[in-house]
Image: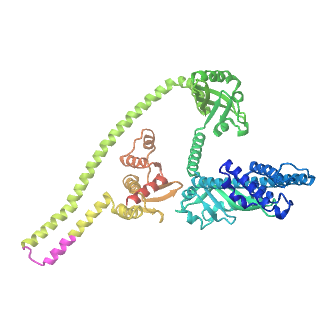
């Protein structure tokens, strides 16, 4: 019966056709019964009619089936009643047979109608399934998010285009691998645990944020939602898992925005912490407060104690300042801005602090205040300074006359310093002239005479007037050339030793100390660490000139038989110390050097060199000798050295 109704659409095109087919079937059954009457002799009058009833019920519908019953009743009565070919009967058995025919026909029609409706429902269900499958396929392929079907082992069964675009794979490549092959290692363990919970029925969905490894090796962040498609097993209600449905949404841009926002918030919090500046946001309509972490810290509060309303905030203000703060808040809601100073009492130690608040009101379209957004700054230190300044003002007023006298003295001292500076300038010019004259005299007295003698010898050789052994004259010329070279080298080394550039400070100092000791007959000891290394040219020149100036002063003024030089590192500084055992600097001159700044050109030059490099010079002198200590900051030495190294 379930296969025969496949022909039913042929008879369902028109209602008239269905009724016609029912009438024809009834007529055929009655005609066949009439032809068989000689054989049947009135028995089984409804046998063929049951076939017509079944045909009408299956293929023609409920109405034609009822029409078939009616026609069959009248037709059978007409053909089998006594007398024949009439519509009357008096036989009780015929009436009972007729009723039985009607009842059986109704049962056949009911069964056929039920079967037909069941088949129709099945066809509708199948059609809807086909439509749903088509709709699902279209939705799956055209979805704006990535979708995939994954079997219970983790292998991909089906993926849509968006899923491939997010991960940068081709569909055929994804179908050859598992989800673990494209997951970042740090998420695999959590994914496996979540999928196991889905299979065990502990959760309905597994939702997480995770990183995936794209085909080009880069990583992306995505929102993952996984559901388990299950069915009923043969045993009944027991869950039979089929495969996982994964939905993927690319959130890389959101992650970058979140990272940028988090970094901005961290920078803002750091800036607020560094500046002791906290921010707040008060909503006048809901009377709610939002305070930054730094503002809570300034008030000595925790997040749990954060003031949730205007009144809770005002309670933290000292009673003497509450009226002015409330007035300022009310005025700000109309004027649009707030600027006020007030005192608070910290919650953690009852300490009173001064606060400076500045804020702006944000209005809605109807000019109603929506938010009061601003900052609060701890100005306690400034207030303490202002108080101290006020207290000192009277004292300063009382000492005006004294200060006036002191200023007059300072003006006199400044004039003396200016005179000393002018004297220093003149002295520098004089020293330059003296140095030039000395260089000229040295060139004239030593090298000049050697050049003249060399010229006479060469002229004698050229003219041929020399009578004697010419080799002796040539040897004399070579000796003059060696002496001339030695004199020029010595003079050049004294002006600026090449060793300082070529071999560094240690080698230059050893060369200079040896030459100085030989010339001055002063015993000099040099202590310099072997691992000193190279410094910048500017630092090495400064340290060399300091040693040179100190030894020159010892030779000219100290009258000391010995001197000691020590170069060392002390903490964050590199220092050079020069000592002698001479007569020292007189107390009067030390006072002038300390008060007026009066000192020789060498000492001033030495101090200026060190000052420009960020260091300092100290001079300690008494009747037992003088100690000069010059120090330079190590970090500056390191930075200069690094820059020199890069330049070289």
Note whether 425 is above or below 48 in the view shown.
Answer: above
Between 318 and 60, the one nearer to me in the picture: 60
Figure quadrant of residue 214: bottom right
Q: Is the magenta stretch mostly helix, strand or loop?
A: helix
Q: Which residue lies furthest to the right in this view?
A: 92
Using the rendered image of the protein, determine whether residue 611 is visible from the camera's viewpoint.
yes
Between 181 and 536, the one nearer to me in the picture: 181
Note whether 338 is above or below 96 in the view shown.
Answer: above
* The magenta stretch spans residue 587: no
Note whether 440 is above or below 180 in the view shown.
Answer: above
Query: Can you give x and y, in whole percent of width and height, for residue 411 in the image?
Result: 41, 31
In which quadrant of the rendered image does the C terminus lie? bottom left
In which quadrant of the rendered image does the N terminus lie? bottom right
Q: Residue furthest front?
A: 83
Using the rendered image of the protein, determine whether residue 627 is visible from the camera's viewpoint.
no
Q: Which colour scheme is used?
A: rainbow
Residue shown at the point (50%, 26%) measured from the top left: 402
Question: Which segment did they paint magenta?
Answer: 464-479
Figure quadrant of residue 221: bottom right
Query: Can you give x and y, in whole percent of width and height, for residue 477 in the image?
Result: 18, 71
Residue shown at the point (82%, 63%) measured from the top left: 38
* The magenta stretch spans residue 470: yes
Note whether 266 is above or below 505 in the view shown.
Answer: above
- Number of numbered tags placed on the structure image: 0
Query: Can you give x and y, in whole percent of width and height, for residue 551 in the image?
Result: 39, 56
Residue shown at the point (16%, 66%) measured from the top left: 453
């Amino acid at each position: 019966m379930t296969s025969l109704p496949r022909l039913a659409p042929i008879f369902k095109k028109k209602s008239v056709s269905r009724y016609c087919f029912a009438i024809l079937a009834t007529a055929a059954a009655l005609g066949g019964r009439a032809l068989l009457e000689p054989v049947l002799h009135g028995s089984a009058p409804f046998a063929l009619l049951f076939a017509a009833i079944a045909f009408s019920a299956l293929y023609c519908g409920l109405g034609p089936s009822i029409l078939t019953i009616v026609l069959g009743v009248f037709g059978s009565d007409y053909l089998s009643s006594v007398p024949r070919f009439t519509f009357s009967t008096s036989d009780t058995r015929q009436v009972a047979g007729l009723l039985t025919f009607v009842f059986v026909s109704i049962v056949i029609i009911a069964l056929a109608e039920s079967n037909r409706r069941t088949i129709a429902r099945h066809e509708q269900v199948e059609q809807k399934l086909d439509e749903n499958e088509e709709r699902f396929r279209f939705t799956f392929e055209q979805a704006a998010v990535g979708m995939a079907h994954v079997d219970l082992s983790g292998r991909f069964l089906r993926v849509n285009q968006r899923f491939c675009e997010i991960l940068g794979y081709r569909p055929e490549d994804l179908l050859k691998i598992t989800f673990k092959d494209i997951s970042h290692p740090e998420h695999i363990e959590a994914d496996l645990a979540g999928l196991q919970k889905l299979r065990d029925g502990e959760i309905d969905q597994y939702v997480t944020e995770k990183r995936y490894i794209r085909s080009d090796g880069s990583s992306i962040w995505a929102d993952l939602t996984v559901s388990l498609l299950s069915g009923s097993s043969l045993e009944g209600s027991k869950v039979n898992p089929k495969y996982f449905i994964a939905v993927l949404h690319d959130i890389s841009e959101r992650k970058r925005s979140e990272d940028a926002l988090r970094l901005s918030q961290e920078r803002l919090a750091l800036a607020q912490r560094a500046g002791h500046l906290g921010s707040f946001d008060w909503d006048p309509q809901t009377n709610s407060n939002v305070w930054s972490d730094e503002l809570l810290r300034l008030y000595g509060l925790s997040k749990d104690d954060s003031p949730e309303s205007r009144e809770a905030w005002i309670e933290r203000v000292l009673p003497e300042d509450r009226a002015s703060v409330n007035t300022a808040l009310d005025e700000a809601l109309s004027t649009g801005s707030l600027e006020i100073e007030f005192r608070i009492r910290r919650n953690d130690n009852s300490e009173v602090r001064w606060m400076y608040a500045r804020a702006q009101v944000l209005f809605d379209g109807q000019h109603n205040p929506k938010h009061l957004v601003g900052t609060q700054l701890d100005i306690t230190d400034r207030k303490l300074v202002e108080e101290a300044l006020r207290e000192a003002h009277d004292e300063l007023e009382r000492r005006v006359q004294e200060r006036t006298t002191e200023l007059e003295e300072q003006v006199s001292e400044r004039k003396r310093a200016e005179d000393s500076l002018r004297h220093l300038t003149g002295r520098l010019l004089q020293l330059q002239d003296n140095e030039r004259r000395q260089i000229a005299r040295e060139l004239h007295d030593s090298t000049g005479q050697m050049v003249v003698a060399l010229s006479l010898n060469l002229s004698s050789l050229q003219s041929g007037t020399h009578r004697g052994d010419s080799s002796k004259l040539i040897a004399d010329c070579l000796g003059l050339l060696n002496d001339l070279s030695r004199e020029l080298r010595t003079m050049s080394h004294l002006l600026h030793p090449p060793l300082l550039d070529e071999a560094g400070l240690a080698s230059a100092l050893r060369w200079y100390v040896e030459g100085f000791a030989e010339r001055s007959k002063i015993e000099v000891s040099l202590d310099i660490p072997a691992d000193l290394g190279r410094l910048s040219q500017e630092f090495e020149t400064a340290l060399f000139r300091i040693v040179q100036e100190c030894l020159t002063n010892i030779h000219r003024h100290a009258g000391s038989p010995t001197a000691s030089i020590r170069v060392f590192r002390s903490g964050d500084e590199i220092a050079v110390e020069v000592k002698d055992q001479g007569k020292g600097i007189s107390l009067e001159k030390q006072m002038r050097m300390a008060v007026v700044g009066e000192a020789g050109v060498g000492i001033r030059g030495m101090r200026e060199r060190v000052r420009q490099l960020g260091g300092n010079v100290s001079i300690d002198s008494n009747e037992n000798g003088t100690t000069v200590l010059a120090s330079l900051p190590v970090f500056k030495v390191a930075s200069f050295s690094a820059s020199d190294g890069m330049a070289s």
